[in-house]
Image (tube, rainbow, N blue to C red):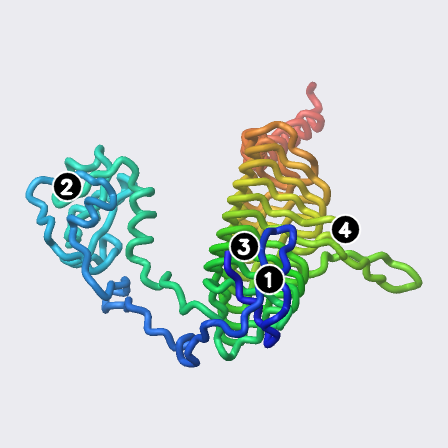
């Protein structure tokens, strides 16, 4: 791989660290025009129905080929498609979809030029495109129509600050007002947005995207194809104090954070650095907005953490765990592979049985929790029965002829 070491010293020797990323020096790199970032004119625009239109049309034939779809008889394959839209706002140049029977009625009255459906819904709709998996087809279509995903210009924006001791690959992009500190390494085709802060010794792999205002503290490591959304902070100190001498004494956190390949982290999330060792997010894990992962937590591969989930220090999640919104996990708790935690649940003890669904606070097996909720709702009826029995007993006790 070719890297540009941002430095005025063109004779600095090449270095290679344990990641395999070289710090080859270069006298100059391809500059980015001062007006190239921050004023980009994206090709798509919102029309009067609120959905996004493309700068160029795509024919239904192209969509059929992309999805390997089966078109209905009489569908005009040369019909241009300008947008992807909901059923109720689609016009005669829009493509829409049905992924549930509950949308069939809306689909019948939709003006969409074509509707992507599964085989079991096709008979109910004209102008359809049959695919084996509607949701997978939608993932393909969203990528096809998303012109905002166009890459920014390659190179370092003139308004960015890249320390001479940092290494930026020649194919990477660094946006305006970004700061890349000494010893940091940015891999091929990675995009660093405006006002991103990358600390000392940070290693970022290939094909990553750091959106505007993301912060990566010193010595953290990001693998390949990692996406970090705006205002997320990776590597801040963990929350650790001891109470001594009438005050809270801070416990330094001298570990790091490792984000493995194919991880996406939403906006305003926080992944704290370890006290010692590392906080780790496993490959393919997806983390929603406003999630807190505390120091030394170990999140296994392919996990899902929905908005406002909180993991306390040293929590360990197995492979493929899924935590609903606002779920919390107490310090040091271990969750077995495939554990599913319902929204707003509080997990206070280990869950050792794989593939278990739990809910409630304290969390327990979900059917047990539902039965207990049902019994709680019956308490008012039970109270009425007890009151009636107490009155009957009192009347019997007060009787003189027993």
**Element at label 3:** loop
Closer to us: mark 3 or mark 2? 3
**Left or right: residue 38 compared with residue 87:** right
* Pointer 4 or 2: first along the chain: 2
* Pointer 1 or 4: first along the chain: 1
Q: Is residue 125 among what the camera can see?
A: yes
Q: Nearer the viewer, residue 137 or 28?
A: 28
> Where, by quadrant of the figure, is residue 355 drawn?
top right
Residue 71: image tag: 2
Question: With respect to residue 347, does 154 lie above or below?
Answer: below
Residue 23: image tag: 1
Q: Nearer the viewer, residue 125 or 15?
A: 15
Instruction: Identify the residue at horizontal 52%, vertical 51% (top origin).
Output: 224
- Check the image and name the residue furthest to the left: 74
Q: CA distance from mark 1 to mark 3?
A: 14 Å
Residue denoted by label 4: 276
Q: Position of residue 178 (x, y in %)?
A: 55, 72
Residue denoted by label 3: 205
* Pointer 1 or 2: first along the chain: 1
């Amino acid at each position: 791989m070719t890297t540009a070491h941002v430095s005025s010293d063109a004779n600095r020797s090449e270095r290679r660290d344990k990641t395999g990323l070289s710090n080859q020096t270069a006298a100059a790199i391809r500059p980015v025009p001062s007006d190239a970032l921050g004023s980009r004119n994206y090709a798509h625009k919102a029309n009067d129905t609120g959905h996004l239109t493309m700068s160029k049309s795509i024919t239904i034939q192209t969509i059929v080929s992309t999805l390997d779809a089966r078109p209905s008889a009489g569908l005009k394959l040369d019909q241009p498609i300008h947008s992807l839209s909901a059923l109720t706002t689609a016009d005669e140049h829009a493509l829409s979809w049905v992924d549930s029977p509950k949308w069939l009625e809306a689909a019948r009255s939709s003006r969409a030029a074509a509707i992507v459906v599964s085989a079991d819904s096709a008979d109910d709709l004209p102008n359809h495109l049959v695919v084996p998996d509607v949701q997978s087809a939608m993932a393909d279509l969203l990528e096809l129509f998303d012109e905002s995903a166009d890459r920014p210009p390659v190179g370092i924006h003139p308004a960015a600050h890249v320390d001479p001791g940092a290494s930026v690959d020649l194919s990477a992009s660094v946006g305006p007002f970004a700061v890349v500190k000494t010893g940091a390494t940015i891999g091929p085709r990675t995009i660093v947005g405006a006002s991103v802060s990358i600390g000392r010794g940070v290693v970022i792999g290939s094909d990553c995207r750091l959106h505007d205002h993301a912060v990566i503290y010193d010595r953290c490591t990001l693998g390949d194809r990692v996406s970090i959304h705006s205002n997320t902070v990776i590597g801040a100190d963990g929350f650790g104090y001891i109470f001594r001498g009438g005050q809270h004494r801070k416990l330094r956190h001298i570990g790091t954070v490792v984000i493995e390949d194919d991880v996406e982290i939403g906006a305003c999330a926080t992944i704290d650095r370890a006290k010692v060792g590392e906080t780790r997010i496993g490959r393919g894990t997806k983390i929603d907005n406003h999630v807190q992962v505390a120091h030394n937590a170990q999140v296994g591969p392919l996990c899902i953490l929905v908005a406002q989930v909180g993991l306390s220090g040293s929590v360990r999640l197995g492979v493929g765990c899924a935590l609903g919104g606002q779920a919390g996990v107490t310090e040091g708790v271990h969750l077995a592979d495939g554990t599913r935690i319902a929204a707003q649940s509080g997990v206070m003890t280990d869950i050792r049985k794989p593939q278990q669904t739990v809910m409630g606070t304290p969390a327990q097996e979900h059917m047990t929790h539902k039965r207990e909720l049902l019994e709680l709702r019956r308490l008012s009826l039970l109270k009425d029965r007890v009151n009636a029995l107490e009155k009957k007993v009192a009347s019997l006790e007060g009787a003189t002829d027993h």
